[in-house]
Amino acid sequence: MDLTNILELKKLMRTYGAWPNKDLGQHFLTDKSVLAKMVETTGLSKNDIVVEVGPGLGIMTRELAKRAKKVYAVEIDPKIAEILSTTCIKYPNIKIVRGDIRDFSPKGIGKYKVAANLPYYITSHVIKKFLEEKHKPATITVLIQREVAERICAKPGRMSILSVAVQFYGMPEIVELVSPMAFFPSPKVYSAILKIKVFKEPLFEDINARVFFRLVRAGFGEKRKMLSNSMSGGLGIDKDIAEKLLKGAGVEPMLRAERLSLDDWRRIYLVFNKYLNLSGGKSAQMADQSDW
């Protein structure tokens, strides 16, 4: 069965009484050239294990299975998972996992890679999950909304919490832009193939990641405001102190957070963390709060 043929795809779904779920952001990839590029970008070998998030009808799942040792296909939609078990029946190296990817643990599966055609609403959750796993993947290859991919790959001047976070854990690259016509149903926006080469250890090993991201969140907490104001308000410290600490880190207090590089944030962490520890343990309190 050719699952890139929209007529066949529709017929299959009607047979099972299923249809793309808008609430789950389901847009099935039907373009053969984009499919080939996605699979090529994963860089699979016969010894690789792949975790595919939201495999849908198995359009990419089957191609991954032809190249990899094992594919864990994690699907939350029970009706789609039922169809998947049929379309992938000829591939014994595909294990269908029914459930939410946020509940999936890669512990014990060995070295692995992640591949996915991700809906917008869950993109950051999935990327965050795998970048923060103790057992991290070697690479993450995802087909996501173009705007989100560009935010992830941003440089100083256009940085956000998302770009800082992803670049803290890995090296992202936009491989190819993808037209809405490559999907059924067609989304309203362009997509992009994004590949993240995941670092074995975070970019900076000498810091507490949760405290680091609490500081980053403070810096980005008040859009279009000077960094000194944002850090002051976000951390509950006097503005004069925030300015002094920023200068001590070699960062201009009048800058906005989107202008900073990851090296700037590391210097801010080293100075602010030391001050907060000396001023009553606020750093430890921050470590218990949510990060990015």
Image (cartoon, rainbow, N blue to C red):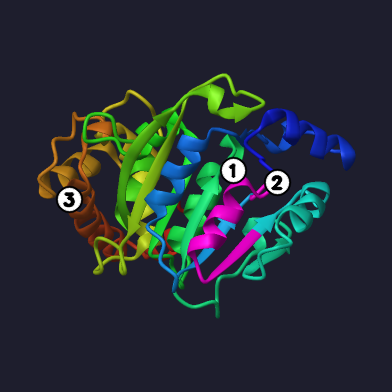
Q: Tell me the CA gap for discs 3 and 2.
A: 43 Å
Q: Amino acid at mark 1?
A: Ile
Q: Which residue is mark 1?
A: 122
How dense is the environment of label 3, judged by Cα within 10 Å: few (below 14), some, or many (20 and up)?
Answer: few
Residue type at mark 2: give it: Leu
Q: Quadrant of residue 6?
A: top right
Q: Magenta span has 200? A: no
Residue tagged 2? 57
Q: Which mark is nearer the camera, 1 or 3?
A: 1
Query: From which residue to which does the magenta span run?
Result: 55-73
Q: Nearer the viewer, residue 290 or 244?
A: 290
Q: Amino acid at mark 3?
A: Asp
Closest to the camera, between mark 3 and mark 2, is 2
Q: Is residue 236 visible?
A: no
Question: Which residue is at 66% across, 41% downward?
Answer: 2
> Where does residue 268 sit, x and y in percent of width and height?
21, 50
At x 73% / y 35%, what residue is drawn?
Answer: 9
Compared across the picture, whether 84 is left or right of 219 comes to right
Q: Residue at x 33, y 39 (%)?
A: 175
Mark 3 = which residue?
263
Where is residue 223? Give x, y as percent: 38, 26
